[in-house]
Image (cartoon, helix red, strand yellow):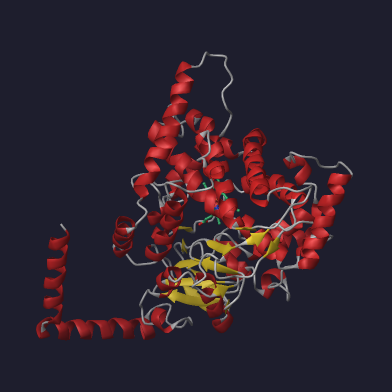
Amino acid sequence: MTSIVISLFIQLLQLLSHPLTLTPLAISIIFYCAWNFFFHPLAKIPGPLSARLGIPTFRSLSARSNTYSWNHKALHDKYGDVVRLGPGIVTTTDPEAIRTIYAYGSNFHKTKFYSVFAAIMSKPSLFSNINPHSHASGRRSVARVYSMKSLIELEEYVGPCVQQLLEQFDRLASVTGEKTTHRPVEINKWLHYFAADTIGELAFGCGFGLLQSGQDASSLLRVFTNLSYFGSISGALPGLVAPLVNAILRKTSRHSPSVISPHTWERVNKRYKLLAEAPYDEPVRRDMLAGFIKAKYPGTNTLFLPSDVVAQATSVFGAGSDTTAGALAGFFYYVLTHPTVYGRLQAEVDSAFEAQRISMPVTYAQGIKLEYLQACIKEAVRLFTPVAMELPRIVPEGGMTIGKYFLPAGTHVGANAYVFHRTEHAYGPDAELFRPERWLHISEEVRATMERNFLSFGSGNRICIGKNIPLMEMSKLLPALLWRYSFSIIPRSKDSPHRHALGRSVDGIESKDGPGRVYSHWFLGIDVRFTLPSA
Ligand code: HEM
């Protein structure tokens, strides 16, 4: 097979390099670029030269080099609120336009960019489904699984994961007292295990043993992160090139997506078996998997087929694992690099424990009442946006105008939370600063505007349906960690992971001894080590 592909490729090159082919090809390319530059309906919109010449490389290359967010921000800093990012692709930081694009009931639908993100290519997930009708009915079918009532029921399945993480940290830190000790810990790795095992508990009825074993033996997490990485590189390419490049990336990856299926089917089949064998009145787990098994196709009385149950649960894993891990790592990154914030937060948590307003294991109801903790979470997710590319939508019939530019129907338009949240229009002159206080003691009116500009979970019809779940997880986990340990970021050393690459801050600034290395494609993440020093 490989030799056939190579020989076809060589023949294609020979054909292309023949003068009879080469001349018309070169002329066509020149015409194409000139038309894009001078006559395309978006020609007046500023942007990188490649985009203005009709070459769709900016997004793919930035995603590929893990530098997406700050490259994208640099373009908006240079060109203003409206930037042409590819031949027919525009991004904006204009609040008014963003409100229109992501309004509830808006007819700006998802673009094909999303199609290549599905973990199971034959079945679009709720996230990757770009058909507005089947998406809307699919979302209705599972809405109950994500409701506030279900969230309260899910809390009991998060507790054991918190406990396991604490046990592992105790072991790593070799506990000496209430607050513990010495060793450098790749905390982001453990937070990722926590996020993934928790999603396993919720969506598949049991974790993946990551917290217990301390390793991702089957590379499950690597595979899911890669799916998004490959999606962000290929999804930005035009037409049929996108699925083709995506298929090649998946096929040639060292971590094959084929590891997903045994994990998912085994867990779902186990639950069906349990249900079939259980006496009628025996209580079963009331987790998300139970909800998917009970879900019905829209407008019918027919239960989801097992393959749809697997697809839903897998999509929860894809959407909820790296994102939650990123939010947790971002929280530590910002809090620990801002000692005054850390001090104030620690004081809040300590006094709540001492006054017995909260106790171990921390409940969601207790955690949510810690005002400063909640402000820190919100502020961390505002700046360390776990999803860090624009959320592209198709401009509907009639087109749209942003400032002085007209975008005809069919243009792909979107906003990137990472970029928008750092603008003055969204969060004022100090928008780029980590300042949790901005969320405290403000009028209802100001809060409403800040919330409206908060895009970390998306907005409108396609807003993150699971957004309360990470907030519940974080409200339970973080007070427990802060109470039990004193954290600090340790400088990179010769035994740091990724020690050969320069450190890189969340603003994209590289330095030899920056403590961590932030990477940015569809997801924003960080490789950084912390220590748990004795108090
Ligand atoms: C901090 C954690 C999270 C962040 C920042 C986040 C962010 C997002 C964003 C930005 C979108 C919208 C994408 C778009 O419009 O293109 C989204 C969609 C989605 N998220 Fe989350 N997410 C998080 C956690 C979760 C969790 C834990 C779950 C599941 C338990 C989840 C399930 C979903 C699903 C199913 C969608 C697709 C919704 C739809 O299109 O109808 N997310 N998320």
From the viewer's perspective, is 422 left or right of 221? right
Write the residue at 42% across / 81% down. Answer: 43
Write the residue at 41% across / 73% down. Answer: 61
From the viewer's perspective, is 8 left or right of 215? left
Q: Nearer the viewer, residue 315 or 403?
A: 315
> Is residue 161 visible to us here?
yes
Point out residue 359 in the picture as x, y percentages from the top left corner. Answer: 80, 40
From the viewer's perspective, is 69 left or right of 379? left
Outermost residue, right direction? 355
Q: Nearer the viewer, residue 216 or 319?
A: 216
Q: Quarter holding the C terminus?
A: bottom right
Vertical side of 339 occupied by 225: above or below: above
Point out residue 11 in the picture as x, y percentages from the top left corner. Answer: 11, 72
From the viewer's perspective, is 311 left or right of 165? left
Write the residue at 80% across / 47% down. Answer: 369
Vertical side of 375 occupied by 283: above or below: above
